[in-house]
Amino acid sequence: MIQEVIAYMTTPASAWARDLGFLAESISIDARWNRYSDAYRPHQRNCHEAILNATENLPQRQRIVLLGAGIIYDVPLADLIERFAEVILVDCIFSKTTRKLVREFPSVKLVEFDLSGVCEHLATHDGKKNLPELKSGFPDVALEADLVVSLNILSQLPLMPEKFARKRKWDGNIAKWGEQIECAHIIGLQELPGPSLLITDFAHLTYPERSHNSYVEESTLYSITSDPETEWIWDYRPESVESGKARCALKVGVWMFRK
Ligand SMILES: C[S@@+](CC[C@H](N)C(=O)[O-])C[C@H]1O[C@@H](n2cnc3c(N)ncnc32)[C@H](O)[C@@H]1O
């Protein structure tokens, strides 16, 4: 807990990313990766494998862009540094672990960017609480990439903006707007000039106490039009006697948008 407080005070972050809760969320995700490292390993391995498979057979390997890579554990960084002249990590918050790790590698660049295109407006609005229109959700570097990867971020994109807008009673259909944020990201990936890879959770599983066979499944996405090419289960909150909470997991899938 003390470590998390220190991280909150010392991790660089824009005012809007703090206000909307991204910094606190990033620190708690980072802490979960450390606490549950054994349980997270298969998910980590699957993410690495999906990304590396997608880099095979590319016509060239100048630049790879990873969206949602602020917490580095699901990125096979060493392999990507070997394979690409430039590795660009995009997120609205970069954890201290990520910042420290990439410092030694000049070919790795960090781009702080709001991939929903609405967050800064929410945090600095002019008093009229109309839901902001979506702006472009991709940084320019993605337009000239040999591969763009959306990495465990799609379901997260509407979450903080929706929570913020609901808490402060913004006008408009918040769920519909959240759906638009999500759809804009998928369409953006599909419309990029080069190939893109989408890795995202698409269902949340809650297991009743001590049951490993039955679970309650709820979608984590508003809409996804096709079945994934591959999928796995990520035990993001393994059963734990000490927490006394039920086991929860996510179904994670991989979609490749080829040109
Ligand atoms: C579940 S984490 C992604 C997975 C992470 N790479 C890991 O190892 O678990 C979600 C990431 O999306 C980022 N994120 C959420 N909304 C964002 C936005 N609007 N713009 C940029 N990044 C965003 C968060 O900061 C966080 O790093």
Image (cartoon, rainbow, N blue to C red):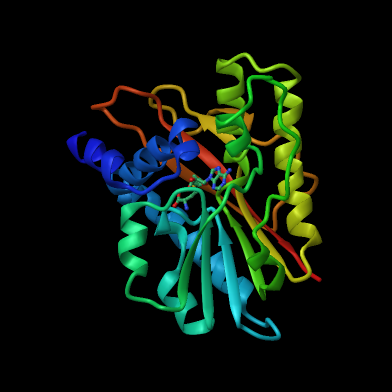
Residue for point 56% across, 33% down: 204
Viewed as shown, does residue 140 lie left or right of 159? Answer: right
Q: Is residue 23 above or below residue 99?
A: above
Q: Residue furthest front?
A: 126
Residue for point 41% across, 42% down: 26
Residue 229 pos. (x, y %):
69, 58
Image quadrant where residue 101 sits: bottom left
Image quadrant where residue 27 sits: top left
Image quadrant where residue 221 sits: top right
Residue 22 pos. (x, y %):
46, 38
Q: Is residue 110 above or below residue 136?
A: below
Taking depth in this image into account, of 212 and 236 the one nearest to the observer is: 236
Taking depth in this image into account, of 123 and 146 the one nearest to the observer is: 123
Count up the numbered dots.
0
Position of the C terminus, as image quadrant, is: bottom right
Residue 41 pos. (x, y %):
38, 55
Q: Is residue 76 above or below residue 43?
A: below
Viewed as shown, does residue 2 lie left or right of 158? Answer: left
Please indicate, yes or no, whether residue 202 appears anywhere in the rendered image.
no
Position of the N terminus, as image quadrant, is: top left
